[in-house]
């Protein structure tokens, strides 16, 4: 079942779904079917992409245009082979997706592990969107970032963009 079908099924059983940064926000008057919740979680990136398409945010065509433009610049201006240009363009698209879908949380718990400050590991701010920041322990940052990259890659795949190799995003 694709993301559009999942959203339609959710509406039929009374679930209201919204995109909330990189997360899905579900509201229902009664407990939803567990198999539907699992399917939504399994296809989260695609569902987020479908919701954003419907809300006026970048549609699949916008993402493909951005990807193609970035690949063309790398290929034509940078002299890279097409496959290498596409790998770099995919990295660019992942970063753009994460920037357009910031994660914001309260400063009292780590968005990665859910725990507050602890001895030897304080919460540190990450990101700077107008809505706020995400707060993370330094040791939680890399696994959290890997999940964000995977979510972005799934959303891009739903838009018809796949990387010929695993994204090679470098830590700054």
Image (cartoon, rainbow, N blue to C red):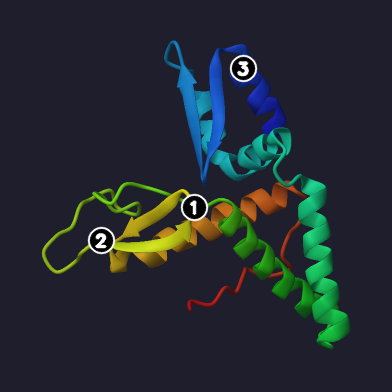
Of the residues under marks 1 and 2, which one precedes in the sequence? 2
The residue that appears at 60% across and 45% down in the rendered structure is: 45
Q: Earlier in the sequence, mark 3 or mark 1?
A: 3
Q: Residues within 10 Å of mark 3 (few under 14, many from 20)?
A: few
**Residue beneath disc 1:** 130
Which residue lies at the image location 71% right of the left edge and 52% below the top edge? 157
Q: Residue at x 46, y 51 (%)?
A: 103
Measured Cα–Cα span from mark 1 to mark 2: 20 Å
Q: CA distance from mark 3 to mark 1?
A: 31 Å
* Rendered image: mark on residue 86: none
Residue 51 in the image: x percent, y percent?
65, 35
Which percent across, then down, holds residue 14? Answer: 55, 13
Q: Secondary structure at mark 1?
A: loop
Which quadrant of the structure image shows residue 95?
bottom right
Tag 3 secondary structure: helix
Q: How many marks?
A: 3
The answer to whether 73 appears left or right of 93 in the picture is: right
Say which residue label 3 marks: 11
Report whether 134 appears left or right of 2.
left
Q: Position of residue 86 (x, y in %)?
A: 77, 72
Classify 10 Å Cα crowding around label 1: few (below 14), some (14-19), many (20 and above): few
Crowd class of label 2 (few under 14; some 14 to 19; many from 20; radius 10 Å): many
**Inter-mark Cα distance, 2 to 3:** 38 Å
C-beta proximity under 8 Å, tags 2 and 3: no
Q: Is residue 130 visible?
A: yes
The residue identified by callout 2 is 123
Does 90 sit left or right of 98 as displayed? right
Residue ranking furthest to the front: 130
Q: Please provide percent x and percent y for residue 144.
A: 41, 59
| Labelled pair 1, 2 in contact (Cβ < 8 Å) | no
Let me know if residue 1 appears in the view: no
């Amino acid at each position: 079942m694709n993301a559009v079908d999942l959203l339609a099924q959710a509406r039929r059983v009374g679930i209201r779904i919204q995109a909330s940064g990189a997360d899905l926000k579900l509201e229902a008057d009664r407990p939803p079917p567990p198999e539907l919740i699992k399917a939504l979680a399994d296809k989260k990136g695609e569902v987020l992409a479908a919701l954003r398409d419907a809300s006026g945010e970048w549609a699949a065509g916008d993402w493909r245009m951005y990807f193609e433009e970035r690949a063309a610049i790398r290929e034509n201006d940078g002299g890279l082979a097409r496959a290498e240009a596409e790998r770099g363009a995919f990295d660019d698209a992942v970063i753009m997706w994460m920037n357009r879908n910031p994660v914001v949380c309260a400063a009292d718990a780590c968005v990665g592990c859910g725990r507050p400050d602890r001895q030897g590991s304080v919460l540190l701010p990450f990101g700077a969107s107008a809505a706020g920041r995400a707060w993370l322990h330094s040791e939680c940052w890399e696994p959290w970032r890997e999940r964000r990259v995977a979510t972005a890659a799934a959303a891009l795949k739903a838009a018809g963009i796949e990387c010929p190799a695993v994204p090679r995003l470098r830590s700054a």
